[in-house]
Amino acid sequence: MRSSVESDAVSPASSAPEAALSVRGLVKSYGSRTAVNGIDLRLEPATVLTLLGPNGAGKTTTVEICEGFLRPDDGEVRVLGLNPVTDGDKIRARIGVMPQGGGAYPGVRVAEMLRVIAACSAHPLPADWLLDVLGLTSCANTPFKRLSGGQQQRLALACAVIGRPELVFLDEPTAGMDPQSRRLVWEMIGALRRDGVSVLLTTHLMDEAEALADQVVIIDEGKVVARGTPEALTSHSGEQQLRFRARPGMDLTSLLAALPSGYFTEEPIAGNYLVRGQMNPAVLSAVTTWCADQGVLADEVRVARRSLEDVFLDLTGRELRS
Ligand SMILES: Nc1ncnc2c1ncn2[C@@H]1O[C@H](COP(=O)(O)OP(=O)(O)OP(=O)(O)O)[C@@H](O)[C@H]1O
Ligand SMILES: [Mg+2]
């Protein structure tokens, strides 16, 4: 299924500036498994494009092809106007990469690793400043293997940006981070964007995508299923929701009967109720009256548009894939 908002974002006008990254008809298989099956992307300069998708959707495969670490089977990829297969050396000097899961030689010390990476760049950022900004000064002499998972992630981010890249690839940069570290990374991504850096970001965190992305691309089973700004993705259907919390297991057929036709009710998580459809004062009143008739107090009653998570789950399913 392709979202109607998608068509707005795929094809640039012929006069549009060169994309920081463009991908057309990308295909990549591992044996008989097709990981990426015809993906198109366009990342505008100085913007953040976020790839969302369930585990195994093909995000890392797509990112690694763009980084030049994997060869595509088919399709066209241009990174800063260059082909990652034939112009890998030129591209590497202009991009920053934070791979999923990171990794480094276990014995390397934090500052040492950063200085080695900085030495590959003509005009690196000052390593001490970056360590300070990312809260790593106190572990500058700590071997990589002794860092916590979140500290390793922050070091990986420092390595990705120290060479003043024009384009950075961040594959789940905040996975496993505490909320403070996550905020720090969000601030850094915002600062990169303000400095004119283009960012391709993958994440499973919907609030991260909503907070950072200029464009979101949702992929599933190697294909794009929707794309657009977070705003467009969550509001284009015009559908709203009324959410409330109450005693679990209430009879929703009687709630449905109390509403005009065209509304849907569900209890996606025990005690969390959802009424979908166009909201107006009469519907809100019908729901609270129904709750009163049931003898329950509706708690945390809220009218809102669909969240990015709702859009994501509607498109990619609510069941865990094997
Ligand atoms: N080196 C490999 N050899 C064989 N299959 C692979 C390899 N790398 C990835 N795959 C398969 O390709 C598909 C896409 O994997 P990919 O890592 O791109 O997904 P992802 O969207 O990044 O998932 P996650 O959210 O879990 O990181 C999966 O089915 C995965 O099992
Ligand atoms: Mg991945």
Image (tube, rainbow, N blue to C red):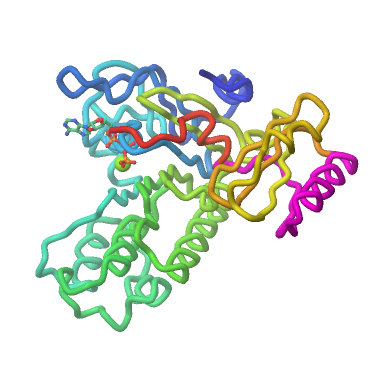
Which quadrant of the rendered structure holds the C terminus? top left
Q: Is residue 196 on the magenta stretch? A: no
* x then y, percent, for residue 42: 49, 29
Identified at 33% across, 76% down, the residue is 136
Q: Is residue 103 left or right of residue 82?
A: left
Q: In this view, does 32 lie to the left or right of 4?
A: left
Q: Residue 112, can we see it? A: yes
Which image quadrant for residue 140?
bottom left
* x then y, percent, for residue 292: 81, 53
* x then y, percent, for residue 145: 15, 69
Q: Residue 123, can we see it? A: no
Q: Is residue 217 left or right of residue 136?
A: right
Which image quadrant for residue 64?
top left
Identified at 19% across, 57% down, the residue is 103
Q: Is residue 306 on the magenta stretch? A: yes
Which image quadrant for residue 320?
top left
- The residue range painted magenta reads 280-309
* x then y, percent, for residue 117: 23, 60
Quadrant containing ligand 2: top left
Identified at 44% across, 27% down, the residue is 22
Toward the bottom, the furthest residue is 138
For the image shown, how many numbered marks are present on the structure?
Answer: 0
Vertical arrangement, residue 142 with respect to residue 207, above or below:
below
Vertical arrangement, residue 155 with respect to residue 216, above or below:
below
Instruction: Between residue 297 and residue 64, name the one nearer to us.
Output: 297
Identified at 62% across, 34% down, the residue is 233
Vertical arrangement, residue 86 with respect to residue 60, above or below:
above
